[in-house]
């Protein structure tokens, strides 16, 4: 049985229900008093559209990381890709649960977006791109690249992609009445913090990989 705020009730006996509230990605669940009511916190249309849009946004990032194994031997990039794939796949599952608990559809407009537990090929379908998402042309260039060229396109593309996520979070909190749901607020702030950190990592990797950035090449 679903209770408010993504809360589930369990019973050890018929008189003392245990109410468990699942945490956001990376956070533990917590036990709430039996008196916890089933009313979900207020949500706005902007909240729902943020979650739906971020699912689409994250799905493309997961698709990008799926290319790494067959396109580069760069160990640092492989580790970064595994980190991004794991965290964003976990966040996709959280966002799907958040929407389902509120009776909201997973997709904004694309019916094929319903199953996002696995990477999707999003480079050949017309769609409304969320901020920072790579165009079909950019995705095709990434698919056709290998080695150092792939590394360069991946890093520049994922930096662009992450900056788009920051714009989405900023727009959410700039919308009157949005972001009041505690789970959504925690999730959005975690996205902002995590992706800012990854942008710094990728910028450092890009500078290290840039041609002419070795001592031998400097005058």
Image (cartoon, rainbow, N blue to C red):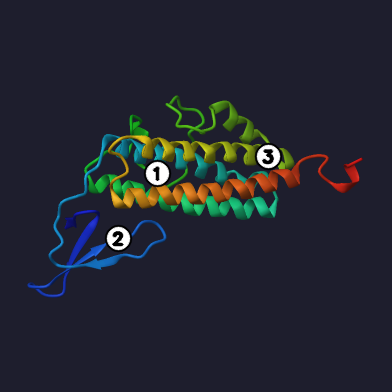
Q: Which quadrant of the view contains residue 176? A: top left
Q: CA distance from mark 2 to mark 3?
A: 39 Å
Q: Residues within 10 Å of mark 1 (few under 14, many from 20)?
A: some
Q: Which quadrant of the view contains residue 147? A: top right
Towards the viewer: 180 or 75: 180
Query: Residue 134: x and y, percent?
Result: 54, 32
Which residue is drawn at the image coordinates 70% and 43% (left, top)? Answer: 206
The answer to the question of whether label 2 and label 3 lie on touching residues, with beta carbons closer than 8 A, is: no
- Which comes sooner in the sequence, label 1 or label 3? 1
Q: Residues within 10 Å of mark 3 (few under 14, many from 20)?
A: many
The residue identified by callout 2 is 22
Badge number at residue 49: none
Image quadrant containing the C terminus: top right
Q: CA distance from mark 2 to mark 1?
A: 20 Å
Query: Residue 87: x and y, percent?
Result: 48, 53
Callout 2: helix, strand or loop? loop
Badge number at residue 116: 1
Towards the viewer: 158 or 126: 158
Q: Which quadrant of the view contains residue 143? A: top right
Which residue is drawn at the image coordinates 53% and 50% (left, top)? Answer: 84
Q: CA distance from mark 1 to mark 3?
A: 25 Å
Q: Disc 2 or disc 3, which is closer to the eye?
A: 2
């Amino acid at each position: 049985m679903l209770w408010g705020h993504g809360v589930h009730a369990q019973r050890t006996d018929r008189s003392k229900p245990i109410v468990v509230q699942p945490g956001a990605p990376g956070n533990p669940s917590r036990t709430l008093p039996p008196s916890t009511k089933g009313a979900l916190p207020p949500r706005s249309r902007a909240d729902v559209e943020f979650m739906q849009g971020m699912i689409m946004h994250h799905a493309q990032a997961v698709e990008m990381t799926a290319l790494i194994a067959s396109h580069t031997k760069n160990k640092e990039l492989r580790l970064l890709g595994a980190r991004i794939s794991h965290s964003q796949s976990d966040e996709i599952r959280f966002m799907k649960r958040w929407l389902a608990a509120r009776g909201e559809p997973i997709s904004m407009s694309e019916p094929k977006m319903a199953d996002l537990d696995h990477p999707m090929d999003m480079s050949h379908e017309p769609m409304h791109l969320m901020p920072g998402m790579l165009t079909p042309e950019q995705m095709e260039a990434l698919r056709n690249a290998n080695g150092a060229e792939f590394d360069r396109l991946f890093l520049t593309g994922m930096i662009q992609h992450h900056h788009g996520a920051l714009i989405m979070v900023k727009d959410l909190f700039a919308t009157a009445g949005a972001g009041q749901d505690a789970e959504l607020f925690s999730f959005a702030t975690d996205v902002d913090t995590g992706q800012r950190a990854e942008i710094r990592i990728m910028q450092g990797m890009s500078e290290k990989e840039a041609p002419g950035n070795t001592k031998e090449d400097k005058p």
